[in-house]
Image: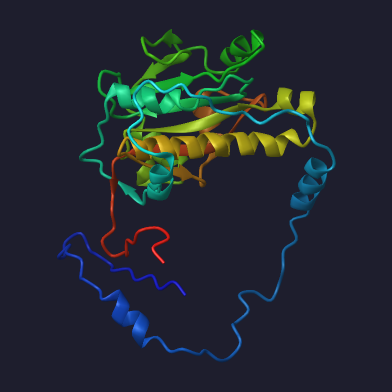
Amino acid sequence: MLLLIRQNINTNEDKSITNIDVLALRKNLQKDYFGTANTLSSSRHSWDILEQIEEAVSTTHSKQDLIKSYSNTIRKCEYESKEIVLKRRSAQMMNKDDSKISKNQFETLLASTLTKEDNPVNLVLFVHNVENLEEGLYVLLGNSNDENDENDLKSCLKDTFVWEKVQSKVDNLYFLQAGDFKYTAKTISCNQDIASNSAFSLGMLVQFDKQIQKYGAHRYKELYWNCGAIGQQLYLEATSLDLSATGIGCFLDDIFHEVLGIKNTSYQSLYHFTIGRGLFDTRLTNEEPYQN
């Protein structure tokens, strides 16, 4: 059983947090529980479309290999893999008062997601606070074997974007538009501060229609797997840089598409992410992994 205790704090009241003896609370919990749990609802809504999707994407495999990251680090190794994996956590909140990261850290994070294989995932970046980078909207193009893919993407996005190549250690990084996108990033991420209080947040914009038509329905699942693999790579790289990261599962893709000017399903946003300097909630216990 997980017991979550929240303290309501009014902006005009004392903001101190009461220390809670979690061990004492656990000790006082009764050992046995009786009765039957209440039914939340007497009715059940059937989402037929979910079963149809599952059937469609499970019938055949696209036979397209998943993307694989390769060693493209731009720094020396400082930790063992096991140490980073065990330390990896999802940030609960970001420190907006200390959100700046260096350009080198930013480039290291992006470089870790690059692949040698054909990669249909483009990273659209809301850069909030990165040294020597103008605040604004950027895009890191995925690696494509089709020379027309870059032009296809440009034709789907707003024609007002400048597409200025960024002087960076990472290839295919482009500056699109200057401005403060904190509120936009927060709104897209279901009004979560974690997307605006970070150094940068991003949406994974995937070539969609062309991939499904070329490889078949099962490619729908694989596109999500590819985004998940990139997300895990960002988690680990952020941890190795003593930064914090978290995936954002709740996002409003229609608003994101509108910001970019996308009006069809040629490209779709499948996953969002944010990286910065996390704050630890002292009301929660923090134990070493696998200590028992």
State the image coordinates of residue 247 (x, y, percent, origin top left): 47, 43
The quadrant of the picture occupied by the C terminus is bottom left
> Would residue 125 be found to the left or right of residue 278 on screen?
right
Q: Nearer the viewer, residue 33 or 191?
A: 33
Name the spot of residue 82 as percent of width and height, x first.
Answer: 43, 45
Query: How are the colours assigned in the image?
Result: rainbow
Image position of 175 (left or right of 114): left
Name the residue located 70 percent from the left edge and 29 percent from the top edge. Answer: 65
Whether residue 270 can be seen here: no
Question: Residue 249: x percent and y percent?
Answer: 52, 46
- From this view, report whether residue 188 is shown above or below residue 140: below
Q: Is residue 108 visible?
A: yes
Where is residue 225 drawn, in percent x and y?
63, 38
Q: Horizontally, is 209 left or right of 128 in the view?
A: right
Q: Which residue is painted at 40% across and 28% down in the image?
A: 109
Residue 267, above or below 194: above
Left or right of residue 156, residue 126 in this image: left
Q: Residue at x 59, y 16 (%)?
A: 153
Image quarter of residue 257: top right
As drawn, the residue found furthest toward the front would be 80
Q: Examine the rendered structure and indicate whether residue 226 appears above or below residue 144.
A: below
Above or below, 12 relative to 55: below
Q: What is the number of callouts on the image? A: 0
Residue at x 26% of width, y 36% of height:
99
Picture quadrant where residue 181 is located: top left
